[in-house]
Image: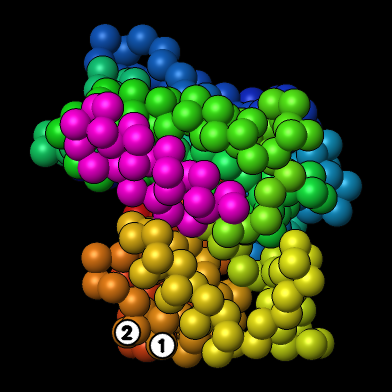
Amino acid sequence: MVGDRVQAVIKSVIPYRILDSRGDPTIEIEVVVRGGRGAKASFGRAAAPSGVSKGKHEVIDFPEGGVDASIKKVRGLIAPKLIGVAAGEQEKIDGLLHELDGTSNFSKIGGNAAVAISMAVAKAAASALGKPLYIYLGGGRAIRLPYPLGNVLGGGAHAGKMAPDIQEFIAIPVGAKRFTDAAFANAQVHKKVKTLIEAKDMTFTGGKGDEVAWAPNLNNLDALEVVSRACEEVAGEVGFEVRPALDVASSSLYDAKKQKYVYERGSVNRDGGEQTDFILELIRTYKLFYVEDPMHEEDFDGFAELTRKADKRCLICGDDLFATNVGRLQKGIKAGAANAVLIKPNQIGTLSDTL
């Protein structure tokens, strides 16, 4: 990690069973360290999420037996090995997690336990130095926030059966100068989308998906039309550009036996070439700024073709394609398979593997 050497050592690693934002059980880890500035005890706490539409190249959330089995592994196997280790030895600690698990996908201890321990250690080490986590990890120049992507209309695995097939319809305030302005614009688009949905879907009662995006009874094109119009209207109000974007989550649409992308709304099945043409048409028509997982997670060639043909001002992003995995990312770079990547520590299992 960047910065001063952390003198504090790990005194305890405590697992807890908690509920995540969807109400599902998961694991939280508390790491207590002592020996830093002032020799006072410091701690870090982290919980691990689980995705609804997980890629098959991600680590396993929990071992057989679920959260309780993972907690037992932390108490009996992992905690005794970490006590006394310097909290600043992040790579050593993450390496120990791999060694103790002994599998390529954390199927023995669970990826959720691994990433929660890894993050809790980093937070505890930062606290021992009296530094915020972002400075501890990134150094003194880590002062820029990314643009927030606002998920304003949901479908697919995030919403009900009558919602669109595409998983996320997103607003990106690309013209905002400050994060606060961008966050405000996203909130305004979210409100505007509800008003526009009510004019199109007479059955809409304000239902939301599990990420708080609206979940209407609309087909994909009507949903995108709503979000595009909302972005345009809010851009006029705030005085800077707001662009629509998509997370297609194409792996959840792809039927490997049929070798088709199955769009239940409209009863349309598209092969790889038709899927590419469909996404390109959406990019052109709606001036999309960003498209995540437009092809299924094994289609590096399809990603590459789409990236070559798409407007260069549109980011073609791999999430399930790369799964925060260095080997898959190297393969994608060689193939020219995307021009953006989504990074999620819980996909790969530790902070060191992520960074």
Which residue lies at the image location 32% right of the left edge and 12% below the top edge? 39
User: Image quarter for residue 24?
Assistant: top right
Instruction: Spot the residue most to the left.
Output: 141
One can see residue 98 in this view? no
- x 64%, y 31%: residue: 198
- Residue 291 visible? The answer is yes
Work out whether residue 150 or residue 1 is closer to the camera in this orientation and state it. Answer: 150
Magenta residues (range): 222-246
Which image quadrant for residue 148?
top left
How many numbered marks are there? 2
* Residue type for callout 1: Glu
Q: Position of residue 289 (x, y in %)?
A: 33, 57
Q: Main secondary structure of the magenta part?
A: helix
Residue 76 counted in the magenta span: no
> Pointers 1 and 2 in contact (CB under 8 A)?
yes
In the displayed image of the protein, which residue is found farthest to the right? 65
Relative image position of residue 143 (x, y in whole percent): 16, 34
Pointer 1 residue: 305
Secondary structure at numbered mark 1: helix
- To which residue does mark 2 refer? 308
User: CA gap, disc 1 to disc 2?
Assistant: 5 Å
Residue 207, given in percent of the width and then of the height, sits at 72, 30
Q: Nearer the viewer, residue 295 or 287?
A: 287
Q: Is residue 105 above or below residue 72?
A: below
Name the amino acid, label 2.
Arg
Asked if residue 178 is positioned above or below residue 312 in the image, the reply reads above
Image coordinates for residue 202, horizontal then vertical, percent: 74, 34
